[in-house]
Image (cartoon, rainbow, N blue to C red):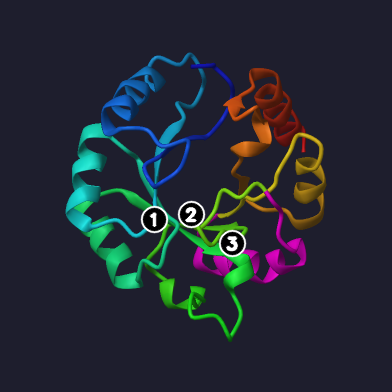
Amino acid sequence: MVNLPVDYIGFVFAPSRRRVTPEQAALLSAQLKAWKTPEIPQSVGVFVNPELEELAAIVKEAQLDVVQLHGQESPQFCREVKERLGTRVFKVLSVQSLNENSEASINHELYAGVIDGLLLDTFDPLYGGGSGSTFAWEEIPAYRDWARAQGIPLFVAGGLLPSNVAELIDKYSPDGVDVSSGVESDGVKDIDKIAAFVGRVKQA
């Protein structure tokens, strides 16, 4: 594990080539506590339409700080997660599916007063996210303004790279960014790309 000034570290429990086991996540989460940084990164579990019992078991074993939900999870489900598990909940909206003709569309306003963070990602029909491609960034301001009115952060994911993340931050001022494939080489995390990405985010 590499010591860099990041705020969150994500563990994928949804179907993905990046998927980890609860046991692996627990070991890595424990290592975070040893980081010699002013703020210890928080652990985030990434899920798609999990069952509450399964989710509860993983959160307990992996000692997750945040649950990030990429599926069709309802406001009621998000509320139950918070009340039962005591974690914060970040809800993900797949931007390309947000249109009135899509059965998969989600009305973010229904989550007012429920979620602790909103993340915009590019729609992927297989996994719900993690496609490595960007969406129309012009969609960001409306969601950013809504999130700020709710007093919660807005994060942006989808196709972010060391070469474009500063432009995103400069133009649209999200509260945070989420990256995975953009800092990989041949499907494996690349420390040089990670360091470059983090450096450009902090500079911006």
Give the image location of residue 20, x and y in percent. 37, 33
CB atoms of marks 2 and 1 within 8 Å: yes
Q: Secondary structure at mark 3?
A: loop
- The type of residue carrying mark 2 is Tyr
Q: Residues within 10 Å of mark 3 (few under 14, many from 20)?
A: many
Mark 1: amino acid: Val
Specify which label sits upstream in the sequence, 2 or 1: 1
The region drawn magenta spans 133-153
SS at badge 2: loop
Q: Which residue carries the number 1 mark?
A: 48
Query: In the image, is residue 17 part of the stretch drawn in magenta?
Result: no
Inspect the image, locate mark 3, and give the three-letter code of the amino acid beneath it: Phe
| Residue under the point 21% across and 38% down | 60
Quick one: 183 or 86, which is closer to the camera?
Answer: 183
Q: Which residue is mark 2?
A: 127
Q: Reply above or below: 64 against 28.
A: below
User: Label 3 belongs to which residue?
Assistant: 123
Mark 2 and mark 3 residues within 8 Å of each other at the beta carbon: no
Residue at the image point whose x is 50% and y is 67% from the top: 150
Task: Kindly report the secondary structure that dominates the magenta region of the rendered protein.
Answer: helix
